[in-house]
Image (cartoon, rainbow, N blue to C red):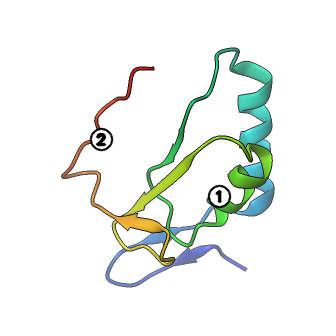
């Protein structure tokens, strides 16, 4: 089974095991304080689900050109930029 869906926009969704692996790598290697997590290609929110489980106290915001959940903000990050928040 493929996690690739073709349509007007091509989408490749991150599987929960890969999301967990990536979160574990952040925990192992990032030594600073994480103040916010941005998921720039949130799609159906599969990675956001794992991130919110692994980092439950850290604010999480998701963006996608074609979001599949109400809590993901529609935005084309190839045409728009996010301002870096210094804390």
- In the rendered view, would you say 68 is above or below 25? below
Residue at x-position 70% and y-position 53%: 52
Give the x, y percent position of residue 63: 41, 58
- In the rendered view, would you say 67 is above or below 20? below
Q: Residues within 10 Å of mark 1 (few under 14, many from 20)?
A: many
Measure the C-alpha gap from mark 1 to mark 2: 20 Å
Labels 1 and 2: the sequence-earlier one:
1
The residue identified by callout 2 is 82
- In the rendered view, would you say 38 is above or below 4? above
Disc 2, SS: loop
Quarter of the image where the N terminus is located: bottom right
Residue at x-position 65% and y-position 66%: 46
The residue identified by callout 1 is 47
- In the rendered view, would you say 44 is above or below 53? below
Quarter of the image where the C terminus is located: top left
Q: Nearer the viewer, residue 5 or 20?
A: 20
Q: Is residue 5 left or right of residue 78?
A: right
Q: Nearer the viewer, residue 24 or 31?
A: 31
Give the x, y percent position of residue 41: 46, 57
């Amino acid at each position: 089974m493929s996690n690739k869906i073709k349509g007007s926009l091509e989408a490749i969704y991150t599987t929960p095991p890969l999301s967990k692996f990536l979160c574990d790598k952040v925990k192992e290697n990032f030594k600073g304080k994480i103040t916010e997590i941005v998921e720039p290609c949130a799609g159906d929110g599969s990675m956001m689900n794992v991130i919110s489980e692994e980092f439950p106290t850290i604010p999480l915001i998701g963006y996608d050109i074609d979001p599949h959940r109400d809590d993901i903000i529609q935005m084309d990050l190839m045409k728009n930029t996010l301002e870096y928040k210094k804390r």
